[in-house]
Image (spheres, rainbow, N blue to C red):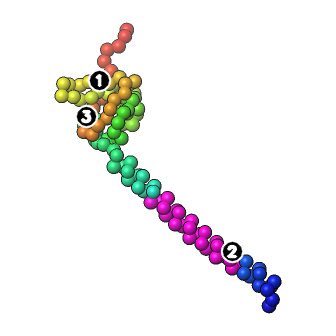
Amino acid sequence: MNRKENLPIEAEAKALKDLERAEGDLKHAEEEVREAVEELEKTKRDDLVTITMDGIDHRVRPGKWLVRDLKAKLGVDPAKVLAEITPQGLKDLDDNAEIEVHAHEKFMTHARSGGSS
């Protein structure tokens, strides 16, 4: 066999070797992505705090919340009032107010009282 006849065989062998290397790189990259996603999900879980609403514990992210968004997250009927339980008593929260949520806070819901006639 002369050199010209070997060129297609050598090119094919090199292409196969390159393909195997690329497949290995892809598997490695996929594993890195999977590990990163798992770490992100773990971090998100670790960043949650427990609050109590109507005697039931819920896990939510700490920080600023619009009351209406927190109610939606907790599955509270929008027609109800969310109230914070404080040492001084209940503090009704306006749906448009922004509150800071911390671990171990306690809330309850109740029907809106009063109204215009």
Dot 3: within a 10 Å radius of its alpha carbon, few (fewer than 14), some, or many (20 or more) residues? many
Q: From this viewpoint, is residue 97 visible?
A: yes
Q: Which residue is mark 3?
A: 106
Give the residue displayed 41% in from the left and 55% down from the top.
39
The residue closer to the viewer here, 40 or 107, is 40
The residues tagged by marks 1 and 2 sit, at their Cα atoms, a distance apart of 70 Å
Residue type at numbered disc 3: Lys
Indicate whether residue 21 is drawn in magenta: yes
**Residues rendered magenta in the picture:** 12-35
As shown in the figure, which amino acid type bears the numbered disc 1?
Asp
Mark closest to the chain's N terminus, 1 or 2: 2
Q: In the rendering, which numbered label is found on residue 15?
A: 2
Amino acid of disc 2: Ala
- The answer to whether marks 1 and 3 mark residues whose Cβ atoms lie closer than 8 Å is no
**Direction from residue 21 to residue 6 in the image, left or right:** right
Which callout, 3 or 2, points to the residue nearer the camera?
2
Q: Magenta stretch: dominant SS?
A: helix
Picture quarter containing residue 57?
top left
Q: Secondary structure at mark 3?
A: strand
**Position of residue 9 measured from the top left corner of the image (x, y, whole percent):** 74, 82
Q: Are marks 1 and 2 in contact (CB under 8 Å)?
A: no
